[in-house]
Image (tube, rainbow, N blue to C red):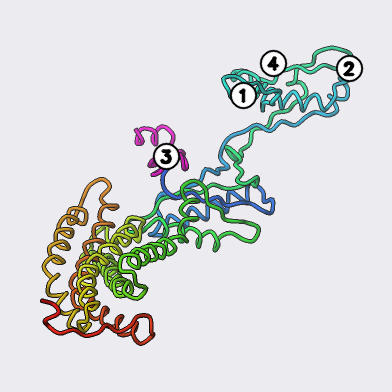
Amino acid sequence: MFGVGAKVAPEATVIAMNPPALPGLGSVGGWTLQLQDMSGHTDAELNELAGKIVSEANQNPALQGVRTTFKMTAPIYEFDIDREKVKQLGVTLSDVFTAMQVNFGGAQVNDFNQFGRTYKVVLQSDLRYRSEAESAKFVFVKSSSGTMVPLDTLLKPKLTSAPTSISRFNATRAIQIQGNAGQGYSSGQAMTAIEQIVKAQAPTGYNIEWSGQSREEKNASSSTFQVLALALVFVFLALAALYESWSVPFAVLLTVPTGIMGALVSEYGLSLLEAMFGHQNAGLQNSVYMQIGIIMIIGLAAKNAILIVEFAKVRVDRGMDPVKAAIEAAGLRLRPILMTSFAFIIGCLPLAVASGAGAAARNGMGVAVVGGMLFATSLGIFLIPVFFVATEWLAVKLGIQKKAKKKTEADYM
């Protein structure tokens, strides 16, 4: 269908667009930038700037399918009013303007309420009486003598070109520029790339805004670290309530960075390997799915630490030396840690190696979780006892808790 259309109208621009990922946020998928004209530039200046930005953006590997709805090639008619004839025929100039506005542009004259909604009443000529320049002959204005004068006798049409539509954003004239992220690039990287291009090409007097899904993404991008911080805070509070201690939760939380490091190393390490072997879709993005996987890792890494710390804490409270308690707890809980961790890792492998529609989202989460759990498990079984002993020693030194009285082997029988 596209090929046939291109042959019939070689000057046409055909663009294939995806629907928005979130229905209701924008009309098409990808990012949507609004370049606001704050200084009142002419249509020709706006058209030249839009062409430069689109041409430069389509050469950037982080962007693809960059387009704009602002075009100066739409044919229009400009009407020059013969003011001398208007004066001679005794027609009021304001009546001419009003007739043109109402019949060709439309004018709201009233509102009415029905079915619990408010509807606007717009007065306008029917389509067949306003779609051509000659349609002005069907519109009449009254002269001072009471005769009806056809509007086409007072107008001189002139064929020219202008923008198809003039859009505004936040009450300011704006150029809408849309596009998608290139292969191997995230939407955030694409938005940063187009921002840099626009700032380099646009002179002073312009402002950059985002609309649709891009606006929500831009506003939410700064909340990633806040979400991670809140996740750590809630885990800390839950552990503090579980152990009735403000120091023991640190022994658990200190192992979380190993899982986060594993997720990041897995994501970017796999991207580098794919790039080395020339994979066309190389590069896993730091997407929201990867961030969800990292939040999952916080809980899963803490789970492994809890299995050891809980047993070690009970023994320390009974008077056992922290070092001996940590070693004993690690030995007792090694098999449950390995069983639960590898069961979860194997269960997430289909996500990490998924293909087909929607695979990018599943890969981002799966690789983060699998890599993070491998790191958290392989390093955690050695680091968790160390963190527990260090936390216990520091808590005693700072006076947060008293040193437990040592007991003999008979006390444990």
Neighbor class of circle 4 (other Cα within 10 Å; few <14, some 14-19, many 20+) is few
Which of the two residues, 179 or 220, is positioned nearer the viewer here? 220
Reading the image, the residue beneath label 4 is 138
Q: Earlier in the sequence, mark 4 or mark 3?
A: 3
Q: Dot 3: what SS?
A: loop
Reading the image, the residue beneath label 2 is 144
- What kind of residue is marked 2? Ser
Which of the two residues, 300 or 264, is positioned nearer the viewer here? 300
- What kind of residue is marked 4? Phe
Q: Dot 1: what SS?
A: strand
Disc 2 versus disc 3: distance between alpha carbons? Answer: 56 Å
Residue 334 at x, y = what percent? 13, 70
Residue 252 at x, y = what percent? 29, 71
Residue 348 at x, y = what percent? 19, 56
Disc 2 versus disc 1: distance between alpha carbons? Answer: 36 Å
Residue 86 at x, y = what percent? 84, 24
Q: Is residue 345 visible?
A: yes
Q: Earlier in the sequence, mark 4 or mark 2?
A: 4
Q: Earlier in the sequence, mark 2 or mark 1?
A: 1
**Left or right: 223 in relation to 280:** right
Q: Quadrant of the N terminus?
A: top left
Residue at the far top in the pictured view = 147
Reading the image, the residue beneath label 3 is 23
Q: Dot 2: what SS?
A: loop
Task: Magenta stretch: give its range.
Answer: 1-27
Disc 3 versus disc 1: distance between alpha carbons? Answer: 25 Å
- What kind of residue is marked 1? Tyr
